[in-house]
């Protein structure tokens, strides 16, 4: 990445984040929802904004830009709601270094507030037209399916999962969870940004696939960071060990300490595997960012730089760069 381009992308990220924070304050009056939204990285709305700018080449009117920012906030509402529900499902007690919302407010309150966030987002999308509203509903449906797949994977013995009857199938299940739980919102964010810029046809698929590849790389990077920090998650560890080992590792037939021992034995191979997979998705995203369907502008250049920029910001926690 050229130094000049990196500085431009840094400036864009900081300026966009400031504008998104202002838009959140304008749109969200509910104090509980505002507290849940506080402190987020804003990656999905930032990508929505970058996609919008790449489509308009920065020539949009102030009204169009404010409308696009409003649409970007919707993506953040859906993402934050998913985190509230995730923390309940996973029994996580902390989020961003603070007590999780369900710990502070109770499980019932957290579930209902998460639903309220989704309704708030949907009401905003209705003002943006049928196409945006349908994208929102379809995306959330995929996220929920991903959550259900992960719950099923963690709960049942792998031998009882029809879709995980072989080692390759086990890893396919892992990739499917990544795709539905995480990549879909990145994909929808980029596509929504293009829709807000009045794009149609093939270019929407370009942005959808661009976001999906970044989302895949981001979740893999997130899992790598968690593993490096000692988190042992069945839906991550089991597919990895089955991919790297000759024997099938079955949930329910091994003690946690045995799984951890297997993981530690394969730690170097796992890191190498993750980095290779992350790079593969980053390169795909970069190529999509260069698509001839996207008009030339400094924002198009940023599309090419953004995947590495985003992933390295995640991986710097464990002193890795790609």
Image (spheres, rainbow, N blue to C red):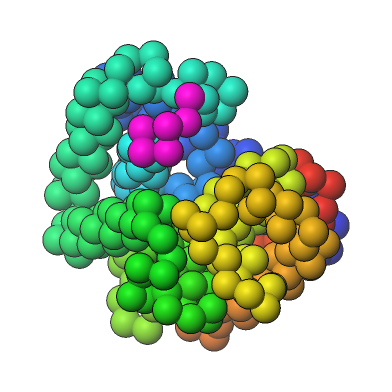
Depth order, front residue of 201/82: 82
Depth order, front residue of 296/21: 21
Q: Is residue 279 visible?
A: no
Residue 300, given in percent of the width and then of the height, sits at 59, 68
| Residue shown at the point (64%, 66%) measured from the top left | 241
The relative height of residue 3 versus residue 29 in the rendered view (above or below) is below
Residue 163, given in percent of the width and then of the height, sits at 36, 76
| Residue shown at the point (47%, 31%) measured from the top left | 92
Q: How many marks?
A: 0
- 72 sits to left or right of 17: left
Q: Is residue 76 magenta?
A: no
Q: Is residue 200 visible?
A: yes
| Residue shown at the point (67%, 78%) measured from the top left | 246
Placement of the C terminus among the 4 image quadrants: bottom right
Depth order, front residue of 104/91: 91
* Magenta extent: 88-93
The relative height of residue 322 versus residue 18 in the rendered view (above or below) is below
């Amino acid at each position: 990445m050229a130094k000049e381009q990196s500085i431009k992308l840094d400036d864009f990220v900081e300026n966009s984040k400031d504008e998104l924070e202002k838009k959140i304050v304008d749109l969200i009056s509910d104090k509980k929802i505002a507290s849940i939204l506080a402190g987020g990285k804003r990656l999905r709305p930032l990508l929505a904004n970058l996609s919008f700018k790449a489509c308009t080449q920065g020539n949009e009117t102030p009204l169009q830009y404010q409308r696009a920012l409003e649409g970007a906030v919707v993506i953040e509402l859906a993402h934050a709601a998913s985190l509230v529900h995730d923390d309940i499902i996973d029994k996580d007690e902390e989020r961003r270094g603070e007590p999780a919302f369900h710990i502070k407010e109770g499980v019932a309150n957290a579930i209902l507030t998460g639903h309220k966030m989704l309704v708030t987002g949907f009401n905003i999308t209705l003002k943006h037209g049928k196409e945006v509203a349908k994208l929102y509903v379809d995306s959330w449906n995929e996220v929920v399916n991903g959550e259900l797949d992960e719950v099923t994977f963690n709960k049942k013995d792998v031998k009882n999962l029809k879709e995980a009857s072989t080692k390759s199938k086990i890893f396919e299940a892992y990739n499917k969870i990544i795709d539905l739980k995480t990549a879909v919102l990145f994909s929808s964010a980029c596509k929504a940004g293009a829709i807000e810029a009045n794009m149609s046809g093939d270019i929407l698929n370009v942005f959808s696939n661009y976001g999906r590849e970044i989302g895949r790389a981001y979740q893999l990077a997130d899992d790598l960071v968690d593993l490096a920090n000692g988190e042992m998650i069945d839906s991550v560890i089991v597919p990895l060990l089955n991919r790297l080992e000759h024997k099938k590792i079955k949930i329910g037939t091994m003690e946690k300490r045995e799984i951890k021992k297997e993981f530690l034995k394969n730690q170097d191979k796992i890191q190498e595997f993750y980095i290779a997979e992350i790079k593969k998705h980053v390169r795909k995203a970069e190529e999509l960012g260069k698509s001839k369907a996207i008009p030339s502008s400094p924002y198009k250049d940023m599309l090419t730089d953004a995947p590495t920029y985003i992933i390295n910001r995640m991986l710097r926690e464990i002193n890795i760069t790609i």
